[in-house]
């Protein structure tokens, strides 16, 4: 599949050096674009394909009352700069107040911009999300953002392919998030470096598009710039009727059906897993590869043979203030964050709401839900999910990246421990000194009620 | 872009694996709209104590022997996580010209070449050798010679490294990618005309 998409987008392939690859869709946000637009201005260049470029502010935006000005003057300036750049260069902007505003990796798919067979880039490492549709999507730096704005191409070396096949069925209560955390735990944070991951197998085929996006989203946490899943009927059903899909939709579907890898296609590497082996996952350390099952215990440095791994483990335990041998479900938490480009779509919110319905957030816990986009928020409110969250004691917020990376006012205080549906548990990611445990939306919701991690497989769901 | 040909400088070692770009430049400093001025915030949470201004004496870059260091040596998977090019801008602005590690994360690796910062991959055993020599001979100086693909010290250490020919060419001559791609503008237009969307 990578081969087919790659070949279709080659503008020029010199014998020595990178290929000039055409880019179909360029997503832009406020943090990694100002220096790129400034570069264009200094060189007297324009945006080559404004209709293939979509912008939205997401990283910095407050998730509280949108009628108020942004309190942080530097955040405000960055968002105003995006606004000015989009207006000067003629780029479509989904601004604060537009229902289409939201996390860039949520709004691309939900509006039908993201389509099978495309090349998609964004100055953000979680661009891999869009690979769920059978597109080649990857994160780039700001210099490359400028390159795409100016030329609608990128200079790229062709990555290798790595198939991750998950057969069988995921047990009840085990989600796409658990599956990808489990795979990252198996590969390590650099296991996918240099590869595009292609997720295959019965577990993947059985997933909805939103679940597939959760899986592809975290490919970068295994070191892979891109992750992809072959398009199928699930993909086409999801896309049909979305605002930006081709008007000749059935013809497009016939084209997209040609994308999946041919039978017997050879990958540079392949690993196989069984869905039944996967349990709900909780990260215990300071990278997403440091992960264990809910019924497991915190490891000790001595569990690892490699010296670097031992040192990483003892550093992580110290930062996380955890003792080896502690059962994971005994770990108390003070904060819960349900949100991010990994898990802030409507199905994620439904899953979390079904857990908290009829329960109260623990009195020691401060919990919040941040929908992935204005549309997700509106849909959730139409379904009454906001009421379930608010009645049980969750904060119900406006759309944005929020406490996934804590660039806006939503952040952990030093020492606070958080069950988070986001994608990175790096030191200080959610606030200096904050301690992040990555989990699925259902596991985060259950932890909010219990005040510590619990195994969702034994949860008492109320009707 | 600044050229890179041969560079000699003091080595700072960072004995950690998986140093992510959130550590290299924490998010509160990503709000600037310029490319410059990020060096003061490099490794901020490790470099400074909780007040944000007092240097943390335990942090490797604060050791007096590595003052003025321009070559950083670290363990595997350096630069993982976020795509923020600000991480490269911060290293560059602080004064680093080269980073040596057994492996790098892809996006960070790529971003380095766009800014004249040379990332060098060496086998783990050789990186370990540099760590040991740096510990024994502080301040320890290395010379990075891109023309000859060599890292060497004054005591006979001589390690060769590989770098893609086109990237090497661009670094040696300080060439700008966009200008080069725009030389193929006609090809891009032909491609756009031929594609049926």
Image: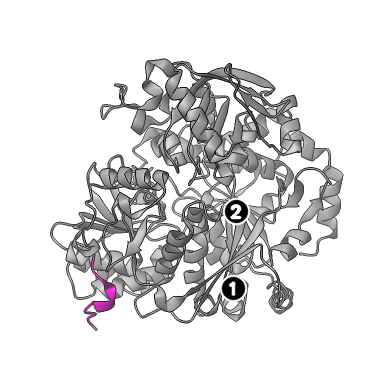
Residue A447 shows in the view = yes
Residue A108 shows in the view = no
Measuring from the top left, give residue A457's x and y in whole percent: 28, 77
Measuring from the top left, give residue A84's x and y in whole percent: 56, 38
Instruction: State which quadrant residue A248 falls in.
Output: bottom right
Specify whether A67 is left or right of B90: left
Q: Which mark is residue A239?
A: 1
Quarter of the image with the N terminus of chain B is: top right
Q: Would you name the residue on which mark 2 appears?
A: A138
Answer whether labels 2 and 1 touch (C-beta < 8 Å): no
| Secondary structure of residue under mark 1 | helix
- Chain letter of the residue carrying label 2: A
Q: Which residues are magenta?
A: A453-462
- Chain letter of the residue carrying label 1: A
Instruction: State which quadrant residue A366 falls in.
Output: bottom left
The 10 Å Cα crowd at callout 2, few under 14, some 14 to 19, many 20 or more, is many
Q: Which mark is residue A369?
A: none
Measuring from the top left, give residue A28's x and y in whole percent: 57, 48
Measuring from the top left, give residue A43's x and y in whole percent: 71, 30
Name of the residue lying farthest toward the front: B156
Kindly report which numbered mark, 2 or 1, lies closer to the viewer in this rendering: 2
Same chain check for tags 2 and 1: yes
- In this view, the residue in front, B17 or A359, is B17
| Secondary structure of residue under mark 2 | strand
What residue is shown at x 69% (from left), y 67% (from top)?
A1
Q: Main secondary structure of the magenta part?
A: loop
Specify whether A453 is left or right of A122: left
Quarter of the image with the C terminus of chain B is: bottom right
In the image, residue A147 above or below residue B160: below
The 10 Å Cα crowd at callout 1, few under 14, some 14 to 19, many 20 or more, is many
In the image, residue A214 above or below residue A308: below
């Amino acid at each position: 599949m990578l081969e087919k998409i790659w070949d279709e987008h080659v503008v020029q392939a010199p014998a020595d050096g990178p290929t000039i690859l055409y880019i179909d869709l360029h997503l832009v946000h406020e943090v990694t674009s100002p220096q790129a637009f400034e570069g264009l201005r200094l060189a007297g260049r324009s945006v080559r394909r404004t209709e293939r470029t979509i912008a939205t502010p997401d990283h910095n935006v407050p998730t509280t009352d949108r009628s108020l000005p942004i309190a942080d003057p530097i955040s405000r300036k960055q968002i105003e700069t995006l606004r000015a750049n989009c207006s000067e260069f003629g780029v479509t902007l989904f601004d604060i107040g537009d229902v289409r505003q939201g996390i860039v990796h949520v709004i691309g798919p939900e509006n039908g911009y993201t389509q099978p067979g495309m090349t998609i880039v964004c100055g953000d490492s979680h661009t891999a999300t869009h690979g769920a549709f059978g597109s080649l999507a990857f994160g780039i730096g700001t210099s490359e953002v400028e390159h795409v704005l100016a030329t609608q191409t990128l200079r790229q070396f062709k990555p290798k392919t790595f198939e991750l096949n998950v057969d069988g069925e995921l047990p009840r209560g085990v989600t796409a998030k658990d599956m990808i955390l489990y795979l990252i735990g198996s590969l390590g944070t650099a296991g996918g470096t240099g590869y595009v991951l292609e997720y295959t197998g019965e577990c993947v085929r059985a997933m909805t598009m939103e679940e597939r996006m959760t899986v592809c989203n975290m490919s970068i946490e295994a070191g892979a710039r891109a992750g992809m899943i072959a398009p199928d009927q699930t993909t086409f059903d999801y896309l049909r009727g979305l605002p930006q899909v081709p008007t000749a939709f059935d013809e497009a579907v016939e084209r997209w059906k040609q994308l999946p890898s041919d039978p017997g296609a050879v990958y540079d590497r392949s690993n196989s897993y069984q869905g039944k082996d996967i349990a709900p996952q909780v990260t215990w350390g300071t990278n997403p590869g440091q992960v264990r099952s809910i019924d497991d215990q915190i490891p000790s440095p001595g569990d690892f043979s490699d010296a670097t791994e031992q040192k990483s483990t003892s550093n992580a335990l110290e930062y996380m203030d955890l003792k080896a041998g502690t059962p994971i479900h005994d770990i108390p938490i003070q904060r819960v964050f349900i949100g991010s480009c990994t898990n802030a779509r409507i199905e994620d919110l439904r899953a979390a709401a079904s857990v908290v319905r009829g329960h109260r957030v623990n009195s020691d816990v401060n919990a919040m839900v941040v929908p992935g986009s204005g549309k997700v928020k509106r849909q959730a409110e139409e379904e009454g999910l906001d009421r379930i969250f608010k009645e049980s004691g969750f904060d119900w917020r406006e759309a944005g990246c929020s406490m996934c990376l804590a660039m806006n006012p939503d952040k952990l205080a030093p020492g606070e421990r958080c069950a988070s549906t986001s994608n990175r548990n790096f030191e200080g990611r959610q606030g200096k000194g904050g301690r992040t445990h990555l989990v699925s939306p259902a596991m985060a919701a259950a932890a909010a009620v219990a005040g510590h991690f619990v195994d969702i497989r034994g949860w008492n769901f109320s009707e | 872009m600044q050229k890179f040909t041969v560079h000699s400088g003091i080595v700072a070692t960072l004995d950690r694996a998986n140093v992510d770009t959130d550590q290299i430049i924490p998010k509160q400093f990503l709000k600037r709209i310029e490319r410059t001025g990020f060096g003061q915030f490099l490794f901020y949470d490790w470099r400074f104590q909780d007040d944000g201004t007092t240097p943390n004496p335990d942090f490797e870059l604060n050791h007096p022997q590595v003052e003025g260091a321009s070559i950083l040596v670290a363990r595997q998977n350096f630069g993982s996580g976020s795509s923020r090019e600000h991480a490269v801008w911060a290293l560059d602005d602080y004064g680093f010209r080269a980073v040596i590690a057994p492996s790098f994360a892809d996006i960070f690796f790529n971003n380095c070449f766009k800014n004249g910062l040379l990332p060098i991959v060496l086998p783990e055993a050789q990186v370990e050798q540099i760590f040991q020599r740096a510990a024994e001979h502080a301040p320890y100086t290395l010379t990075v010679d891109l023309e000859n693909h060599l890292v060497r010290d004054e005591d006979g250490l001589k390690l060769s490294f590989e770098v893609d020919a086109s990237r090497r060419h661009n670094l040696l001559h300080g060439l700008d990618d966009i200008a080069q791609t725009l030389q193929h503008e006609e090809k891009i237009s032909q491609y756009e005309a031929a594609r049926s969307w």
